[in-house]
Image (cartoon, coloured by chain):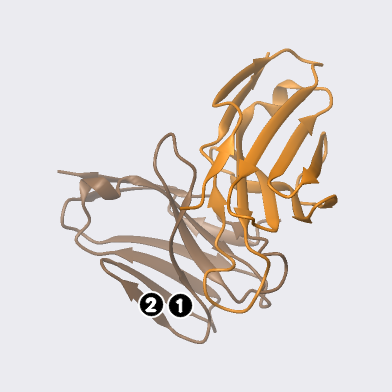
Chain colours: A orange, B brown
Amino acid sequence: DVKVTQSSRYLVKRTGEKVFLECVQDMDHENMFWYRQDPGLGLRLIYFSYDVKMKEKGDIPEGYSVSREKKERFSLILESASTNQTSMYLCASSLAPGAGGTRETQYFGPGTRLLVL
Amino acid sequence: QQQVKQSPQSLIVQKGGISIINCAYENTAFDYFPWYQQFPGKGPALLIAIRPDVSEKKEGRFTISFNKSAKQFSLHIMDSQPGDSATYFCAASITGTASKLTFGTGTRLQVTL
């Protein structure tokens, strides 16, 4: 079974703090993703990475950065946390793109609920 | 810009009934349409998916109906059970784009006894 783990289930941080959210997958997947989930807005893509040291902006990258130094690990960084970044953060991974089958399936971690005070 | 619109936002269905969730998309380049199911405290998990070369796909009690001309697709849950109570997300992607998904806003389904 594919396993995606996130370093924390719950985090409470202060405004202005630097926050690191860590994600690790154990299935040698090329692609990794960070989403935030907010009620009524669904899942919105923050950043994704299709290879080590490669990253691309998603739909809402402002205020975030990412790091992928190893294939299995993808980190989301909030350089200076703000209250509007209070949210559920979900990490996911998938195989490299290809036609058909389950290569597009994204496997999600359990999420990190971040509260910024 | 909401490229995948999902409705309803919430749905209450009696046990044994049919649950129907609808999605509409704008980008005609989308060619992969999965549905994800999320239980409280868990991340979403793939439930069923369809490509536009077929109009329907069925897996057990779950069926996707796809209407390419209308740019719409829907999830039908037959004989709904309390264990189906979850949040459902439709999504769409373009094959080859690093499997980048565009998600709908989600439907919270409650199946009552």
Residue B66: give its label: 1
The secondary structure type at the circle numbered 2 is: strand
Quadrant location, the C terminus of chain B: top left
Label whose residue precedes the other's in the sequence (1 or 2)? 2
Residue at the image point whose x is 49% and y is 43% from the top: B43
Residue at (71%, 64%) from the top-left corner?
B98
Residue B33, how many percent across, how many down?
A: 53, 69
The residue mark sitting in front, 1 or 2, is 2
On screen, B72 above or below A110? Answer: below
Locate residue B44, reporting x and y percent: 48, 48
Q: Which residue is mark 2?
A: B57
Q: Residue at x 54, y 67 (%)?
A: B24
Residue B59 falls in which quadrant of the image?
A: bottom left
Please give left or right for residue B73 compared with residue A116 in the image.
left
Q: Chain of mark 2?
A: B
Residue B4: % across, % down = 59, 61
